[in-house]
Every structure is written in structure tokens, then in C-alpha cells.
Image (spheres, rainbow, N blue to C red):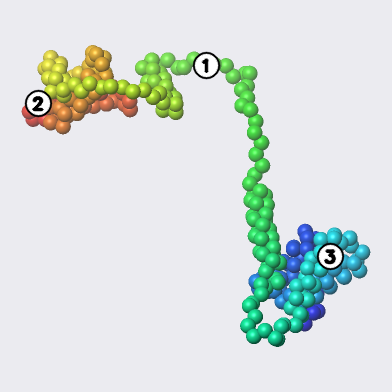
Amino acid sequence: MKKSNLTLELPNFEGPLDLLLHLIQSQKIDIYDIPIAQITSQYLDYLRQMQSLNLQIAGEYFVMSSTLLRIKSQYLLPQNDFVDQVEPDEDPRDELVQQLVQYSLFKKVSAYFKERNEKVPITVAKEASVSKDIRIQPLPKGQITSADLATTFSMVLRRLKMRRPDTALIKVAETPINEMIDYLQVKLTKEKRVSFFYCADQMKNISDVIGLFLAMLELSKNHQVKITQSREFGDLDLERMDANGK
């Protein structure tokens, strides 16, 4: 098939740049090296076909045709033979190439978002509704204890504080760990098992509680105390161990 005898279909182009891009892509032409004479001829043939079909042609199509003819005429102008060294002029196609590249990019982005919009399901927001038939039922007896409820409530409060933590400057006076070790050893001498929460309640300030906790870890490291916890965030049970580790 000759280049001048291009068979054109008549899809709905969105403008002259869309038409030019179609002519270039359908013939696999390098967009950075457009044969301006060939493309101009095909573009004008397309406009003549539209006129023969009595289709309304927007003025921007004729503006593009005049631009193509201007670029074509620049290539037909004779070169100056009287100058030995002529600085290379800018390619008259550069501006048109930049417009086509930008249009091609926006067209691909638009097609991507259109495909994405078709794949994503339509969601409609709705306010939560509660049936009037649902009534508050008491919890079964024996399954949940008051301690479980208190622990759950404290965990909820703790999570709320983590979302919006309170900030404050606290000065903690260091309490010697040896004093708290002696305190725990005296307790464990009287009783084989001691509650950490109970001991912490006997402390006067936060520094004493920190010292108590460090003393508990020190005794556990030296295999003098066995620490157990029945559940997460529950109390710590301290049990005295003998010389054999029992």
C-alpha cells in the first residue's frame, strides 16, 4: 500500500491532536521523527472525507491543518548557499512533537483511571441502624466475673490513653533496690507466696513501685523468686524458692 493511499476509518476523535496521534500510531511512526509531508497529506485527506460526509468540523481541525502546512513549507524553503557555516535551526516539528507527547501521556492516564473506576465496586455509605426489637440482655451468670469486667474496662481506658496520651513532667527519686529486696525477702519469709499488686499498693510513691519491680526482677534472676502470671495484664505472684530451686 502506498503511503498516500491510506484508508481511514472515521472514529470519534476528541480533537486534532487525537487524530494526529491515531495516524502516527496506526502506521507505527516514530513520534520524534514525523514525516511531515506524509502526515499532512493524510490529515487533509481525513478532513476532505469528513466534508464529503457532511460532518461538522470544528475550527481547531483547520487550525491544525494550517500548522501542518506551515511546518511543511518550512522544509520546502531553499537553504542559504552564500553562507559557509550555518548554525542548525530548531526543528519546526519540535513544538508539535511536544504537544503530541503530552497528549499521549494524558490519554494513557485517563484510560487507566477509567478502567480503575469500572473495576472498583460502587459503595454507598449508610448510617448504622439498630433494630427496635433488640433488647439488652443480661450476661449469663457464672461465665463472666466482676474481675473480668474490671480488667476489660481498664484495658479500654488504657487504649484510649494510648490514642490521646497525657503528657506531664514527672520527677522520680531513685529508691535503692537493696531496700526493696529486703522488703520482699521479709514478706516471703512470712508467706511463701506474695502478690505484687498487693505490695505495690503499700508503696507511697511511684519511685518505690519502680524499685519494687526492679527488686522482683533481681530476685528472679538470682533464682530466689519464681514469678507467675495467670493471664495477660493480670497480677504477678511471687513464690519463694529454696536452695534447690524449688
Give whichever of 226, 40 is nearer the camera: 40
Instruction: Name the residue rendered at 92%, 64% in the picture.
Output: 54
Residue at mark 3: 62
- Disc 1: CA contacts within 10 A as few (<14), some (14-19) or many (>=20): few
| Residue 215 at x, y percent in the picture | 17, 25
Residue at mark 1: 137
Front position among marks 3 and 1: 3
Instruction: Name the residue rendered at 70%, 71% in the picture.
Output: 93
Secondary structure of residue under mark 3: helix
Give whichever of 24, 129 is nearer the camera: 24
Q: Does residue 211 appear in this view?
A: no
Point out the tag, 3 or 1, that comes first from the N-terminus.
3
In which quarter of the view is residue 141 placed? top left
| Left or right, residue 41 beside residue 181 | right
| Left or right, residue 156 beside residue 106 | left
Q: Work out which quarter of the rendered image holds the C terminus and state it.
A: top left
Secondary structure of residue under mark 2: loop
| Residue 45 at x, y percent in the picture | 84, 73
In the image, which disc is placed on residue 155?
Answer: none
Q: Is residue 214 above or below residue 68?
A: above
Q: CA distance from mark 3 to mark 1?
A: 78 Å
Front position among marks 2 and 1: 2
